[in-house]
Image (spheres, rainbow, N blue to C red):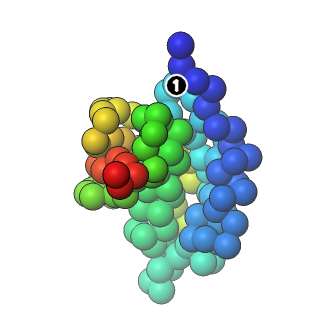
Amino acid sequence: MTAPFLPPEHFHSIQQGTLPGMLGIEVTAVGEDGVHATMAIKAVHMAPNGFLHAASVVALADSCCGYGCISRLPPGASGFTTIELKSNHLGTALEGVLECHARPVHLGRTTQVWDAAVSAGGKTLALFRCTQMVLWPKA
């Protein structure tokens, strides 16, 4: 039997005062199929050229994957750290709301792999994959 997932409110509380909180990331669902979140596009998310900054998109996707990893840590694990990430940017948005869905690909004892898709208005803007190393308390 799967343990209950941490509610979105948990992630809202832990991100206060950190980059995800400052960017306005809102977790909307955490469950068997992964993590869903949104981020309303604001001036702070834009690059000096007026387009959506790639780092804003990566921060949304990486936060969703990280929250997914937290929600799926094996019993006894003390945390995780990202060891690799990759993103493909396929488009941009100038206004509106970004949506992200992060899905587990591999949930191992020592590593997890997560994929995320970021979209706006039904259009896929970026595909993202990251690998996390599961951390264990030192003996």
> Can see residue 128?
no
In the image, residue 49 lies at what x, y percent?
45, 83
Identify the residue at image location x=34%, y=52%. 139
Determine the residue located farthest toward the top in the rendered image: 1
Judged left or right of residue 78, residue 114 is left
The secondary element bearing badge 1 is classed as: loop
Q: Position of residue 23 (x, y in %)?
A: 61, 68
- Is residue 76 toward the left or the right of residue 113 in the image? right
Which residue is located at x 28 percent, y 42 percent? Answer: 110
Name which residue lies at 58% across and 24% down. Answer: 3
Residue at image mark 1: 32
| Residue at image point 57% right, 40% down | 36
State the image quarter where residue 116 is shown: top left
Seen in the image, is 98 located left or right of residue 129? Answer: right
Tag 1: amino acid: Glu
Up the image or down, 115 lies above or below 54; here it is above
Whether residue 54 is visible here, answered yes or no, is yes
Residue 6 in percent (x, y) is at 64, 37
Place of residue 57 in the rendered image (x, y in percent of width and height, measured from the top left): 46, 61
Q: In front: 30, or 77? A: 77
